[in-house]
Image (tube, grey):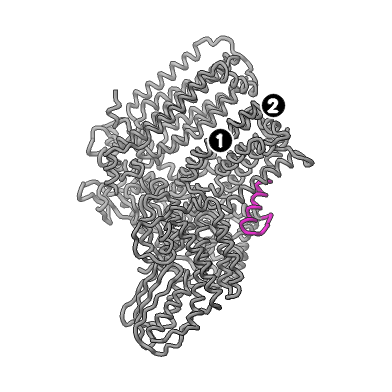
Amino acid sequence: MYAQAFFVAVFGLAAIGFGVVVFRTSSMVRSALALLFSQTAVGCMFLAMQTEFLGVLQIMMMATEMSIMAIFMVMFMMDPGGMGGMDMTHQKRFSIGAGVVAAGVAIVVAFWADWGPVTAEAPDAAMQTRALGMELLGRSMLIFETAGITILTAMIAATAVAIPVQTTANIADKEDTE
Amino acid sequence: MNFVIVLVALLGSVWLLAVVEGWTTTGRLRPAAPLLSGLAHLGRESIVPRTPDRVFFETAPVLLLIVAVLGAAVLPLAPTLVIADLATGALFINAALAYVLVALIMAGWGPNGAYAMIGGWRFLGQLIAYAMLIVMPITAVAMRAESLVTTVIVGSQDGLWNIVYQPLGFVLFFIAAMALAFRAPFDLPTAPGELGGGVDAEYTGVRLGVLRLARLTLVITLASATTVFYLGGWHGPLLPPWAWSLIKTLAVAVSMLLAGRYLPRIREADLMRWCWTLGIPLALLNIIVVGLLVLVVP
Amino acid sequence: MTLVLIVALVTGAILFGIGVYGALSQTNLVMIMMGVELILAGALVNLVAFWRFLHPESYSGQMFVLVVMTVMAVEMAVGFGVAIARFRAKGSVEMEEAGDLKG
Amino acid sequence: MTSDPTMTITGARQRQERFTVLQKWVSRALAGNLSCLIVPGPEVALSHGLDVTAAGMRITATPRDASVLLIIGELSEKMNEAVAVLYAQMPRPRAIVNLGGQTPSTLPDADFSAGVSQAGLIDAVDWLKRALAKGAFSDSPEDFDAPVLHARIEYVCPMHPEVVQNEPGSCPKCGMDLVAREAGEPAPEHDHGHDHREHRHHEHEHQHHDHAQQHEHHEHEHHHGHCHDHHDSHEHDHEQHEGHQHSHENHHDHGHKHQHGESDGDAEEKGSGHDHSGHHHSGHGHDSHEHGGHDHVGHGHSGHDHSGHDHGGHDHGGHDHGGHDHGASGFMSMIEVTKDLPRSADGLAMDWMEVPFGPVFPGLPGGLKLTLTLDGDGVTEGQATSLVGMINESEEGKEIGAETFIERLASAMPLASVSYRLLACLAIERAAGLENDSATDQARAVALECERIASHLGWLAQTGRQLGFAWLTDRAATLQLEIRRASGKRLLELTPALHALAARLGRTPLLKSRLKGIGILPSGTGGLSGPVARAADDAGDAWARLWQRLDEIITSLDYIKATGEPGLPVLRNIGRGSGTGEATVETPRGEAQLSLILEHGQVKSYRLDTACSHHIGLVAKLVEGRELGDALVAVGSLDLSPWEVIS
């Protein structure tokens, strides 16, 4: 129990630490990868909380997701290397306030709420995986399928949006450059 | 205990692979060569390029090595001879392999050089495409075994190996494995003829040594994965289980090595097009076929 | 055992806070998406903690986690689609310059 | 040539306190696997009949991986500079081996030099093995330093690239401060940021170092400009938005990060050289590595350019827009910054980087420098220049003996020496008014065909190197070496092998998809000759050129079979004849034409025209808008020989 608490805390701290780095560092690739490691730490928290499948899934998904994030940062930031030391933020005070309030409220709730009886041991991993599968393809089939369709739609939509539109404008652009 | 044994086996295979590599390139069979070149890497000074992203530059080779070893951790040499027999082993190895990408992006961005950077971003596209071809065939394998546990998967191939049961999956997986190990002809991130070394262009001395070790380990890990998922892992007559695992693994690894020697590098456009337009549909087909087989065949 | 639950919840809360800060303070679309990702990560931690310590018998909790992960992926896909389109059209994904997006 | 086998200390590595056992082993290991970088390139080694691998050295693609710099033949001035940069990039312990010709002025003396011959090469390897085993570590290694490696600093206006001055000041057009950059760099913007970090680093961390005079000077200059800028930006921050502390933290961050990298770099680089001199040297060490970027590994600058261009944008913003235009918000508009950037093929205004490929690049013939402007993995524009091309010297009054002229011409064209020897002979004989003599002509023709085969095989090896097709490289190289040594009869024995090679290439998967449709010449391109022209009749792409060359190999073989023994062209007795002569020879790479004026057996003036000097002009068209890999294949398929580019 204390061991579990310890590991959860350690990975939690790691997640928080990297999370802070995301918005403190000036190099965009760094901040993207910091987010990646933050998410990985979250995945490790899952593992520490004996939720193996979800943990591994989280760790796996985030690697590619955040790498894509990284290249987009490099594409769309004016200062990806962070060598200009430019400032990419606005309404700082307000944001800090909002963040602190949000976290504070959640923490207060976490402490004050009565969580009732807490289960000591979780079902073992193999059984979990199996049960989750049953859940997915049984009761929650509809939700699962919906999620699947949603992501498919999102992918198609995103691609469609991203494909260049041949407006007269950017044809003109092209001609300028040539 | 298992940990030590598996690690030793891994190192041994890496050494053998390096020997074979030297044999194919120089034509001379020199068992000591890998160790010597390792020492030589110690001897060379390791230069830090100007204004690097220090953290990435240092981390990348080590991360690559760690990832390769982690991947091997869930692959059994024998029924009991496995470091971590996770309930989600087949998923875990995907997770581990995904971090090869992270390592290469670090190695590309770290040294602050054009060639390295292009190499790193190239691999982003390459891995995102070919990770699909790793995950989907594994899905089919797991469907047959009705489990994600690697030992169970091997057990499920008793009598009929997956290479026979789902040859399409094997072909796709093998190709994807080569692409993930970025060996020739998939070596776009490190193409000497195009990027003068790409991601490892800036590494010298010890760091280069670690990088090369990591790359060979990665090959072995992927070969071992191929063995576990398709070649019936430890199954085989006469010899003890672990021997069979090692033999098969080495065979796969060497074939990966040789394939690169006799093929020109793939065009990047083709690399992408074939994966998205041909590979992934085939992988889906493979899943469907296997599903049907699982349901129909008792 | 409550200790672990509390630890997890507090972590989740702090991640959530950081995410909120990021999403509000950043001027770049991609950075804002990072903030959102952190918010969702905080949510994930809580969900898993609740499932594990309160209702391990019902797998709807894990189900929910899966859905949230999907949502993260969707958010990425759509966000980047929008980013590219916007960059193509306006030459920037800076919120400072997105007067037309300001409410 | 040095008899005592200890490495000259320039190449040796800083040794630890004492010569430990580990170091003994390491030295042995180092001696055990020598890896060499061949300058100008492996294809030259082959055309000289040198088999480096057989001599016991591994041929490497990059200087980072090489321990021996193998220089073959004379190098041009420009090449000397490039070689210095390469040498600076090689990790210690490193050695220089020089075969034929003297060591470039920019380098320390060669550790071993010999004539261009396999024997010399083998001696060199033996010597290196012994030397490395003994003296891989010396206790006082001098650092390598060459004028090439020092940057000349010039000052440009971020907004008006045309404004370039040698001393800092303000731009006459917009009045903003000029920013420093190293001369000969594409993107002025990046340097600002880069210098920015540079001097804060020099100012704050390394003040105690004694730098080279000129550096000292420049850093001083910078210091002012830099602090000035800084001051400004802080004011902005104060009065305009709360970003102040943030940006400040950033700067600190960089300074710190940089110092870290830099000082560790010293330690890494020079083992335990932590006295002032050590630092002083490593200062240069860094320069050199950074400059190396320019010529071979392309790190540093090009790398900066990438992130640089964007943040160059920031500089615009920071000093111009942010500072003056919309002074209200300190925000730098990305639209403002990227508006004047060209759009890429996909319509996104991304930053481009100018990356040098060559003059010593594994994928290209040595001596050819290809400069590509890359947009990610796509080439937006590029041009090729030859660093070794020979010059038409036809100034009056300078007379060269006929024999020496032939020798000079032949040695100036290492990739096709026989053809040019023949060309010179013919021209001179015509000038002297000699009749053609069928016997010698035949022998000469056969020799020419032999060289054609060898040259095409060399091209195949080069292509294999470019495509990472190891088997092709090995096979073609072996065959080329055999053919150089072979007599007419032996040649015919090689025929099946060559047929087999062609068949094998036809069967190789991926090869067609790699070459088909690449490097198609724009219709109506003039000035073509040789295989390129003949292949232009059908598809006219790299695939067609490959088969054209393979066919030529076969036809040449048939010709040799029909005709007989090759005979190296030697000048017949021309006495002290005079006159003007003109000759044309179909060299392996296309038509070469030489016209000269002979006076009393002396070549008074000549002018040479070769196919490659026309073909090199095609590069720009071939690479534009292609993917990097395809662009390089297209350039390679032209089989340019930089030596035969006449300027």
> Which quarter of the rendering shows the N terminus of chain D?
bottom right
Q: Residue at x 66, y 29 (%)?
A: B145
- In terms of depth relative to the viewer, which is nearer, D141 or D296? D296
Task: Indicate the amino acid at tag 2.
Answer: Pro
- In terms of depth relative to the viewer, which is nearer, D307 or D156? D307
Q: Are marks 2 and 1 in contact (CB under 8 Å)?
A: no
Q: Is residue A10 above or below residue D377?
A: above
Circle 2 SS class? loop
Q: What residue is shown with label 1?
A: B283
Front tag of 2 and 1: 2
Circle 1 SS class? helix
Residue C3 visible, this orientation: no
Q: Residues within 10 Å of mark 1 (few under 14, many from 20)?
A: many
Q: Position of residue B248 (x, y in %)?
A: 69, 43
- In terms of depth relative to the viewer, which is nearer, D107 or B137? B137
Which quadrant of the structure image shows residue A93? top left
Considering every residue shown, the one lying at the far bottom of the view is: D575
Q: Is residue B179 above or below residue D6?
A: above
Considering every residue shown, the one lying at the far left of the view is: D173
Q: Residue at x 53, y 47 (%)?
A: B186
Q: What residue is shown with label 2?
A: B298
Q: Position of residue D458 (x, y in %)?
A: 51, 64
The segment highlighted magenta reads B12-32
